[in-house]
Image: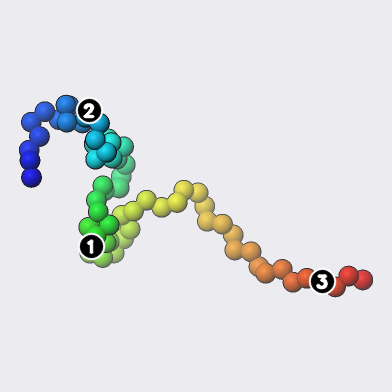
Amino acid sequence: MKYVKDWATFLTEDDQKHVEIKDNMNSPFPLASDQFLDELEEKHQRSFRKKKAGRKLKKTSKLVPVADY
């Protein structure tokens, strides 16, 4: 593990990991591996992942064809 002496310079570098860190700074969700999130969710019995936005779609009933009269 290396230590960062100048965070401003570190976060302005164009590295994919840095982009992920900057994009996730205002998110309430942890930036972690799936394995770590699985362990957190198991330990705390709650979800720590982003969910799809919006409300759930209504389940539609199966339509039965009606005979023509």
Which residue is tagged 2? 12
Report the mark closest to the observer, 2 or 1. 2
Q: Are marks 3 and 2 in contact (CB under 8 Å)?
A: no
Secondary structure under tag 1 reads helix
Q: Is residue 50 left or right of residue 6?
A: right
The mark nearer the N terminus, 1 or 3, is 1
Q: Is residue 66 left or right of residue 28?
A: right
Quarter in which the C terminus is drawn: bottom right
Which residue is tagged 1? 39
When asked about the image quadrant of residue 1, the answer is top left
**Foreground residue among 17 and 60:** 17
- Determine if residue 44 is in view: no
Secondary structure under tag 3 reads loop
Q: Position of residue 7 (x, y in %)?
A: 15, 30
The span from disc 3 to disc 2 (Cα, nearest Å) is: 64 Å
Question: Within 10 Å of the Cα at label 1, are there few (<14), some (14-19), or many (20+) other Cα atoms?
Answer: few
Question: Any mark on residue 17, and which?
Answer: none
Q: Position of residue 64 (x, y in %)?
A: 74, 71
Give the farthest residue toward the front.
15
The mark nearer the N terminus, 2 or 1, is 2
Q: Are marks 2 and 1 in contact (CB under 8 Å)?
A: no
Question: Within 10 Å of the Cα at label 3, are there few (<14), some (14-19), or many (20+) other Cα atoms?
Answer: few
The mark nearer the N terminus, 3 or 2, is 2
Secondary structure under tag 2 reads helix
> Is 25 situated above or below 58?
above
Q: Is residue 45 left or right of residue 7?
A: right
The span from disc 2 to disc 1 (Cα, nearest Å) is: 31 Å
Which residue is tagged 3? 66
The span from disc 1 to disc 3 (Cα, nearest Å) is: 52 Å
State the residue at coordinates (7%, 31%): 5
